[in-house]
């Protein structure tokens, strides 16, 4: 890999810094030093579910509190387009009722899936998973992601909510 000239790197970082500050300002969290995609994902899921952000922005365990007190963990998964280089392990602890995963491909929002603790084992069965701890976890691959979106109605029976894209939601 060829190194980029340090002056070009510094210039590019200045441009990024200005754009990042503008984005965080629009999110209303200008003082945040957290990853902007994490901030965006949490706020978007909270907005789409009618939930509230947890009082502490850096507490472990969950990020959002639902209208009925349910605790929701929010994570994001970013990948290049066609072939993913990152996959994700969804894991429920005793404090989490729901797990929302926001997907970005080529830095574009492509989907938001929300899994329920009560339904995660059914999701694993429907995907024919073989990994351990299926009652509290799912090792999600690109293939699984596509299966869930392609068969949204089946996975909704196991507590999966497709929050985005809206066209995938079955009435």
Image: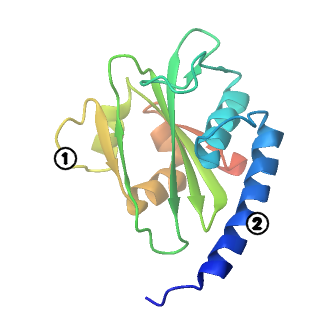
On screen, residue 115 above or below 139: above
The mark that comes first in sequence, 1 or 2, is 2
Q: Residue at x 50, y 18 (%)?
A: 71
Give the image location of residue 40, x and y in percent: 67, 42
Q: Are marks 1 and 2 in contact (CB under 8 Å)?
A: no
Using the image, tell me which numbered label, if any, was put on residue 84. Answer: none
- The image's mark for residue 15 is 2
Q: Is residue 141 visible?
A: yes
Residue 75 spot, x, y in % from top left? 50, 41
Q: Measured from the top left, where is residue 55 in percent x and y?
A: 61, 15
Q: Is 137 left or right of 103, judged from the image as shown?
A: left
Residue 52 or 140: which is nearer the viewer?
52
Category of crowding for the residue at label 1, using alpha-carbon neighbours closer than 10 angstroms: few (below 14), some (14–19), many (at least 20)? few
With respect to residue 88, does 86 lie above or below?
below
Q: Residue at x 38, y 25 (%)?
A: 117
Report helix, strand or loop for mark 1.
Answer: loop
Vertical position of residue 65 compared to residue 168: above or below: above
Spatial CA span between label 1 and label 2: 43 Å
- In the image, what residue occupies the spot 66% across and 36% down? 32
Could you classify mark 2 by the number of other residues whose Cα lies within 10 Å: few (under 14), some (14-19), or many (20 or more)?
A: few
Q: Quadrant of residue 56?
A: top right
Which image quarter is the N terminus in?
A: bottom left
**Which scheme is used to colour this image of the protein?**
rainbow
Place of residue 103 in the rendered image (x, y in percent of width and height, measured from the top left): 56, 53
**Residue pictured at 38% horizontal, 57% vertical:** 87
| Residue 131: numbered disc | 1
Q: How many marks?
A: 2
Q: Secondary structure at mark 2?
A: helix
State the residue in front, 6 or 34. Answer: 6
Residue found at the very far bottom of the displayed protein: 2
Comparing 6 with 112, the one in front is 6
Quarter of the figure with the C terminus:
top right
């Amino acid at each position: 890999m060829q190194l980029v000239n340090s002056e070009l790197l510094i210039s590019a970082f200045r441009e990024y810094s200005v754009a990042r500050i503008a984005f965080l300002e629009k999110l209303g969290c200008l003082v945040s030093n957290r990853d902007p995609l994490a901030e965006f994902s949490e706020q978007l899921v909270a907005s789409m579910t009618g939930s509230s952000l947890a009082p502490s922005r850096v507490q472990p365990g969950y990020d959002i509190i639902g209208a009925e007190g349910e605790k929701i963990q929010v994570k994001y998964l970013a990948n290049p387009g066609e072939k993913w280089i990152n996959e994700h392990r969804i894991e429920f602890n005793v404090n989490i009722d729901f797990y929302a995963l926001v997907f970005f491909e080529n830095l574009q929002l492509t989907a938001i899936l929300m899994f329920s603790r009560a339904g995660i084992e059914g999701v694993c069965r429907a995907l024919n998973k073989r990994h351990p701890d299926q009652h509290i976890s799912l090792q999600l691959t690109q293939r699984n992601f596509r299966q869930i979106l392609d068969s949204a109605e089946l996975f909704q029976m196991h507590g999966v909510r497709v929050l985005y894209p809206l066209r995938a939601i079955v009435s």
